Amino acid sequence: GENVEQHPSTLSVQEGDSAVIKCTYSDSASNYFPWYKQELGKRPQLIIDIRSNVGEKKDQRIAVTLNKTAKHFSLHITETQPEDSAVYFCVTGGNTDKLIFGTGTRLQVFP
Amino acid sequence: EPEVTQTPSHQVTQMGQEVILRCVPISNHLYFYWYRQILGQKVEFLVSFYNNEISEKSEIFDDQFSVERPDGSNFTLKIRSTKLEDSAMYFCASSTGTGHTEAFFGQGTRLTVV
């Protein structure tokens, strides 16, 4: 079945350092790869997404890369700030309605 | 900015009771979803709804669950006979399209079954 593996489950970094979260997926029909950020007790919110015809996308301090052949995608956050602290979910979407969420990465940025 | 809104924010119910969770999707969206998140775990798809019918559902969405769009604005999730394992945060979401369009999530309803 469809599965999205995400690593690491927790990540602690010093403010200003970079953070990298990696995901692998199983469904080769996946063609949409959003990343959601969920602050404690709040709703998941989209921070960036990438589609299968693109290998890399950047938005200020956030970048995503996609390797469709290997079924890997990753999130890179540079110059981390304390407000980046949250749980990050990699997600896949495809030709069906549903989004498949990864297991989540709890990012803590220490001042 | 338009938002998906959910009520109530927290619902406590006795095992075996029926609950209805309510959602108001963003007004020009056509696709509606329910997801759930058991405490500390990932968000799981339950059901999608389009054109007044279920378009897809997961294995979790069994006969105890139903969804309805009773009017032009509300979208509800009903659990007929709640079980302890139904305790979770339930998120409603809506989008303009399917598959690879952004899904906007509500703030969630925390359901506690005792």
Image: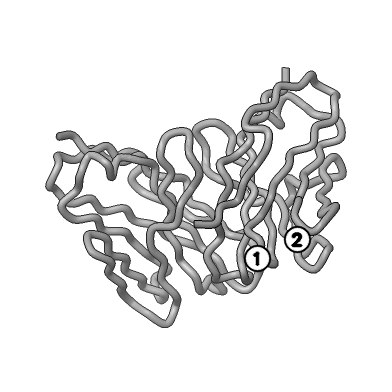
Mark 1 surroundings within 10 Å by alpha-carbon count, few (fewer than 14), some (14 through 19), many (20 or more) = some
Spot occupied by residue B9 in the image (x, y as percentages of width and height): 62, 32
Which-is-in-front pick, marks 2 and 1?
1
For badge 2, the amino acid type reads Phe
Whether B96 is drawn above or below B113: the answer is: below
SS under mark 2? strand
Whether A9 is drawn above or below A62: the answer is: above
Q: Chain of mark 1?
A: B
Mark 2 surroundings within 10 Å by alpha-carbon count, few (fewer than 14), some (14 through 19), many (20 or more) = many
Q: Earlier in the sequence, mark 2 or mark 1?
A: 1
Spot occupied by residue A89 in the image (x, y as percentages of width and height): 43, 50
Q: Are marks 2 and 1 in contact (CB under 8 Å)?
A: no
* Badge number at residue B49: 2
Toward the viewer: A69 or B97? B97
Q: Chain of mark 2?
A: B
Residue furthest to the front in view is: B1
Spot occupied by residue A49 in the image (x, y as percentages of width and height): 41, 66
Residue bearing mark 1: B29
Distance between the Cα atoms at labels 2 and 1? 11 Å
